Amino acid sequence: MSTPLPGFEEFGEPEPVAPGRQGPDDAGNSRTGPGAVSPQEPLQGLLHPAAADRSQARPAGGREIAPGAVHVPGWLTVAQQRELVAACRGWARGPAPIRHTKLPRGGVMSVQTVCIGWHWQPYAYTRTADDVNGARVAAFPYWIVELGRRALVEAYQDAAAGDGYTPDTALINFYDGQAKLGMHQDKEERSGAPVVSLSIGDTCVFRFGNTETRTKPYTDIELASGDLFVFGGPSRFAYHGVPKVRPGTGDPASGLASGRLNITMRVTGLDG
Ligand code: SIN
Ligand code: MN
């Protein structure tokens, strides 16, 4: 790649080839290349963590930050994080490659973003990435729907919380050590269904505010690798942002040598 985006080298670089790791794996999933996981076909472990991995996962439940907003630390095992990173690397390469989103008034976001299902650009969803290369974005795989349903069950400690939850888009954000995300609402969706957020890599300060203003009152929490954050119900349209990433706090075992990856799945409420 001739002009990699800052931080993309670490995020987009293929993982080293481990001997004997090519071809179908033990679970029968095929790999498309050396060490690669197809974004459409993750390894079984993502949905059904092996017993050894489950022991790393934290006890059920989380902390309510605001009504409908729940933080579940350490929800993803390290193996699950690696699978998600591999899938996101695939999407970051195309069909619409990851990029710094341009803002209507001429600014450029410090975060790099790639979308699946629907493409988000300020401030609308389309099926094609018209501000990137015009390509239709990758399909939203069903395994992410299932992951989202499990996330709601876990965060809300309610076996029925995932029923009928069918996210159809995800924004995949990559933060290098300097990247930030200003306070904003996720409000281009025509649905009040919860947003499910998964974080991998470096820890960040995540600021979760109120539905009325960008300013206080808000709560700052730290989102670390493997953490789940869900915001729905009365908090669905709360302002939130990422004022700081803490470089060097991630464990390369997550599959991310540096930086922070965040995946937010959403229900657009759009047809077509
Ligand atoms: C977002 O607000 O879209 C991303 C939040 C995060 O990176 O944690
Ligand atoms: Mn957001």
Image: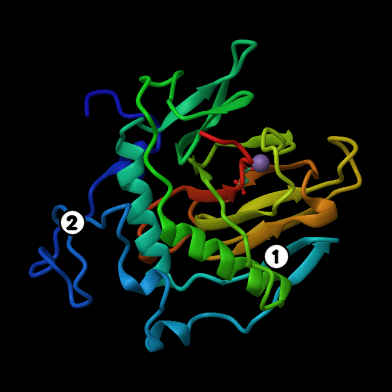
What residue did someone put label 2 on? Answer: 16
The image position of residue 234, as x and y in percent, is 85, 53
- Determine whether 148 is above or below 106 in the image: below
Give the residue at x 30% y 67%. Answer: 43
What residue did someone put label 1 on? Answer: 71
- CA gap between label 1 and label 2 equals 33 Å
Q: Which colour scheme appears in the figure? A: rainbow
**Residue type, label 1:** His
Q: Earlier in the sequence, mark 1 or mark 2?
A: 2
The image position of residue 55, as x and y in percent, is 47, 87
- Determine whether 177 is above or below 249 in the image: above
User: Which residue of the protein is positioned furthest toward the front in this rendering?
Assistant: 272
The image position of residue 137, as x and y in percent, is 39, 34
Q: Quadrant of ligand 2?
A: top right
Q: Nearer the viewer, mark 1 or mark 2?
A: 1
Secondary structure at badge 2 equals loop
Give the residue at x 46% y 58%. Answer: 144
Judge by depth and name the residue closer to the eye, 237 or 17: 237
Q: Which label was assigned to residue 178?
A: none
Instruction: Tell me the quarter of the picture where residue 84 sits.
Output: bottom left
- Determine whether 38 is above or below 77 in the image: above
Q: Report the side of 217 relative to 24 (left or right).
A: right
